[in-house]
Amino acid sequence: MKADDLPLWGTLSNQLLETSVVKVENPSVEVAAHPHSDYAIAAKVIAGERERFQLLVVRYRDMIFAMIMRQVRDRSLAEELAQETFIKAYKALAQFQGGSSFGTWITRIALNHTNSYFVSRRYKEQVRVEAFEPERHEQAIAAMSSNDVEECRQKEDRLTAFSQALGGLKGIYRDVITLCALEGRSYEEAASILEIPVGTVRSRLNKARLELRDAIAELMPQERV
Amino acid sequence: MTSHSHRDMEEWFLDYIEGTLDEARRDAIEHAVATDPLFARSLEEYRELLTCEAELAGREFPSDSALTDRIMAELPINEYPRWSLGELLRRGWDFLREPPRRVVGAAATVVIVMLVLKLGTSTYRDAANVIVDRAHEQHPASPAQPALSKDRAIRAEPSAAQAIPYERGIADQMVEVAPQEDAATLFQEDEQVSPLANQEATAPIREESLALYPEREAERNQGNMAAGSEGSVERNRVPSLESAPATLEKQTVAKGASPKLGDGETAVRSASDDQESRLELSPSGSLAMRNAVTGEALQRGDGSQGEGESGAQVRAIAESLRRGVLPAPESIDFEGFISYFLPLTTHDSEPILFEFGTSPIRRGAKLLLLRITSPGDRAPALGIMAQPTLEIEFRSDLVTGARLIGERRERLIFREALVRPHSNSGRAVLRLFQYVPRERSPSASPSGKIDVSPAVLRIRDARTMRSDEAQPIALLLEQSKKTTDLDLPLVAKAAYFAEALLNRPSAPLSSEMLSSLLSIQPPDVDRRKNQELDALIRAVAVLE
């Protein structure tokens, strides 16, 4: 379903929206003033047009899902976390002031939510279960259409180790890895999302990689030999 | 180059790989890679990590379109309600049409509570104002005892009005026995008492009570017009006192004890086998009630406190009194009454020694004797109350401050007391009255010390001389005439009668004793009262 397919707001809603937008005093006012902007949609949702939130979901669903998927590497879990992320965003929509884009705002929510997941008992129990499911790896390898099965196996094992090591990182390091390394965001974007200086992003990224490297080496000791 | 240095150089990996590292550091890293296999391995693993990241970043993870529907289905419905005028009207109408039960119940509860509070407060305030006004009229505050303010009275318990001393005098409580009346009927009334007291001694009490409660005067007049001996006790019963806890336990009575009154302070001890208590009343009106069992004391006025089962209650009462709050009589027992009424009456009058005891006059019935000894110029008075169903039982800890002065005899120090049985339980309830002393004669003791009038001493002397009964009676009467201007001869006669009973608890009145008592015709006494006493004596003799 495309955003354009959804019914547009009426005259009354537009007036309310414009009134709300004018009150915002920040550089994104002009962007927010667009009736199709994230802020305008959020304002309408707050005004009672709950169905408008679907526009935002459609816009950012893939981005949020992929980001979470790269961290947890589990589709059902990623969908669940993405769903919870959007519901959190919906409940906190009144706090969305339009100072940043909705994408940045909900990315921050997603990062916090996945961080909460990685420190939860639920994640620790899942890691324990995965350690006793070697067939899962075999299925993943068999599904790959690669000529070099051994290479694929090693790659998949490495990715699995990477995911496990990523889950064991501190939240601040996982955030920069996710944004800069997995999502391909620039340092500036990451700095904007995380609300930290760019230099801090770079230093955190390097430290995070060093920790990841050591963690992977512990998970795959034969690789180092 | 040490490994530590290599670790430091690892911090440059990101810049090295991105090509933003300066020349010197780049050379250092390349030199380390060439010379140190471990460092080279470290850099290699770093590069492999970047490969993994690129692998993951390059993969596509399209989301399921159904995710949108699931998200929308899970959104809270009422998170952002649409507030329009129509919506508000619709919700308001729905609320009025079917209001939630909780809201209705809460509103009703609030209304009821507010009404009760308002009504209760106004009613109680009115009652408290009347009480305090009357108290101020009758008892202006003295330095020794701060007067109760209206505000304090208002803050008191709702039943504080009932805690006002039962101000009617003993004479009012006692059934007037007409000469022609069959004295035996006296003992058939469960609630009747057969008193005999010095009318003049109790007159001030009665006057005050009537002043405080003018409506009772009319009631009393009406009651006096009624024939016989009925009614006075019933009329004067205070409901709260009737329902007061009077769980009394049988007290062990010691034999052979004798009264011992100190100078300026009266100490009486309970000579129970296992407990010993003491109540002290100082001239300044401070009361110290000690429980010798626990060795702890409660003193009023100086703040020290006692412990124990009853001590906590007395302490609470004392504390409330200090704050000017009248405790509810329902919440205090016998001991509480003592603690409560004493401070109200010590500011303008001397304490009075009360002695009361019992004597069995028939099976299941006991004669309760009450002797009132006023200090100084006041004469002893004796009240005799016969109660067919009276079973005097004093809880040992209840008679704190009592000292046995003989078998089946106890003594307490009160302002004024009337012992009467509980209507149904057969237990004794002590009622206390506010006492208003008469004006002292010039011969009164100015020290305020408690002393025993000579008449009382003579009575005791007469008891020791009972082998020759005529002699002590005459002596007593003669002595009584000299020591008081009251009806002391009559009182002495009654006292002697009481003493005779007390010292013959098990033996019936002999005909000789009866004739001796009846032969006493004190001069200058109220003839009617003398006849009443004779009727009582005859009645007791008949019962015996």
Image (cartoon, rainbow, N blue to C red):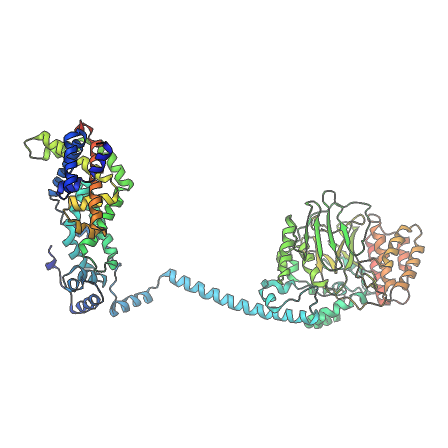
Percent across and percent down for residue A113 are 24, 47
Percent across and percent down for residue A2 are 10, 56
One can see residue A39 in this view: yes
Percent across and percent down for residue B100 are 35, 61
Residue A174 in the figure: left or right of residue B152? left
Front position in the image: B274 or A188:
A188
Residue B318 in the figure: left or right of residue A137? right
Q: Quadrant of the N terminus of chain B?
A: top left
Front position in the image: B22 or B512:
B22
Give the residue drawn at x 15%, y 46%. A183
Residue A130 in the figure: left or right of residue B114? left
Looking at the image, residue A18 lies above or below residue A216 = below
Give the residue drawn at x 15%, y 67%. A10
Looking at the image, residue A37 lies above or below residue B359 = below
Front position in the image: B411 or B473:
B411
Give the residue drawn at x 61%, y 66%. B153
Looking at the image, residue B236 lies above or below residue A120 = below
